[in-house]
Image (spheres, grey):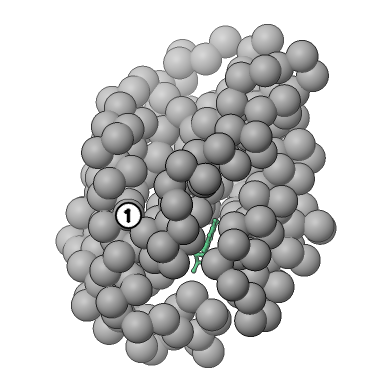
């Protein structure tokens, strides 16, 4: 099977990752790749419905994690798995690292429970595939929580996560740092405190270093 590439984008709210995803999509298309842009929670009608609940309805941390993984499994089965099987590059705004950072580090849920759910929810996506589906690369936009909070202050009406205190985002940021330490090959840290253009350069250089922006990097 000609499997594509799965690249995810992570960081605390206000880190500015979303504006860079389109930029990477353009660069990949310029290299002749077919690109699918998507996000979590979301990406399918069911998962977008679950996203609305997760962002706006009061619930406890375990309910959050159950909804996040339910949305993820549907997204993997309907969109991400089929796109990878076709050889596309899938660019996904957030994935399971967000669950470890927000529900694990932020809300205090047990990491072993999340790892178990990760394995169950992300396995058996393609037919006869008993491997856990995991990103090939994760671009982690790292920004001090105080800077992110200042950026968010001008944003639209905050959702349940954006309205959390800075102490919550300090824990989430630490959660991302811990995930990156556990998966240094997969997670690439981007200094999101730099100017927008420099942030884009770091991102493009990291992807180019893997050979994925060359026109002959795929068959
Ligand atoms: P977004 O606004 O960047 O699209 O992300 C939606 C929010 O959902 C963001 O505050 C992080 C949160 N989230 C979780 O808490 N757990 C998850 O598993 C995911 C994917 C997102």
Q: Residue at image x 76%, y 36%?
A: 77
- Report whether residue 58 is seen: yes
Mark 1 closeness class: few <14, some 14–19, many ≥20 residues within 10 Å: many
- Secondary structure type for disc 1: helix
Q: Position of residue 184 (x, y in %)?
A: 27, 32
Q: How many numbered marks have been drawn onto this rendered protein structure?
A: 1
Quadrant for the N terminus, please: top right
Percent position (x, y) of residue 35? 60, 37
Q: Which residue is at a point 28% across and 77% down the rendered structure image? A: 167
Confirm whether residue 28 shows in the render.
no
Q: Which picture quadrant has residue 60?
A: bottom right
How far from the left and from the top, in percent, is residue 68? Answer: 63, 56
Which residue bears the numbered disc 1? 175
Which of the two residues, 46 or 102, is positioned nearer the viewer here? 102
Task: State the image quarter where residue 205 is shown.
Answer: top left
Look at 45% across and 16% down and name the residue there: 217
Rendered location of residue 191, percent (x, y):
20, 54
Q: Which one is nearer the viewer's eye here, 28 or 148?
A: 148
Q: Residue at x 59, y 62 (%)?
A: 62
In the rendered image, the vertical position of residue 200 relative to residue 146, given as above or below? above
- The vertical placement of 117 against 98, above or below, is above
Q: Nearer the viewer, residue 146 or 3?
A: 146
Relative side of 180 to 23, left or right: left
The image shows residue 204, relative to residue 158, as above or below, that is: above
């Amino acid at each position: 099977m000609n499997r594509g590439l799965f690249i995810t984008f992570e960081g605390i709210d206000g880190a500015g990752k979303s504006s860079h995803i389109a930029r990477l999509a353009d660069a990949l298309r310029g290299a002749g790749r077919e690109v699918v842009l998507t996000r979590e929670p979301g990406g399918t009608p069911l998962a977008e419905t679950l996203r609305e609940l997760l962002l706006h309805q009061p619930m406890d941390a375990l309910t959050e994690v159950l909804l996040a993984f339910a949305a993820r499994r549907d997204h993997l089965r309907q969109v991400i798995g089929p796109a990878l099987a076709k050889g596309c590059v899938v660019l996904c705004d957030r994935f399971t690292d967000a669950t470890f950072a927000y529900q694990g580090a932020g809300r205090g849920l047990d990491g072993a429970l999340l790892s178990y759910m990760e394995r169950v929810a992300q396995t058996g996506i393609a037919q006869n595939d008993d491997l856990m589906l995991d990103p090939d690369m994760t671009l982690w936009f790292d920004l001090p929580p105080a800077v992110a909070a200042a950026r968010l202050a001008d944003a639209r009406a905050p959702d349940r996560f954006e309205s959390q205190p800075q102490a919550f985002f300090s824990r989430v940021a630490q959660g991302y740092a811990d995930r990156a330490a556990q998966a240094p090959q997969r997670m690439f840290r981007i200094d999101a405190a730099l100017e927008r253009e420099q942030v884009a350069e770091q991102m493009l250089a990291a992807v180019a270093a893997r050979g994925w922006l060359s026109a002959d990097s795929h068959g």
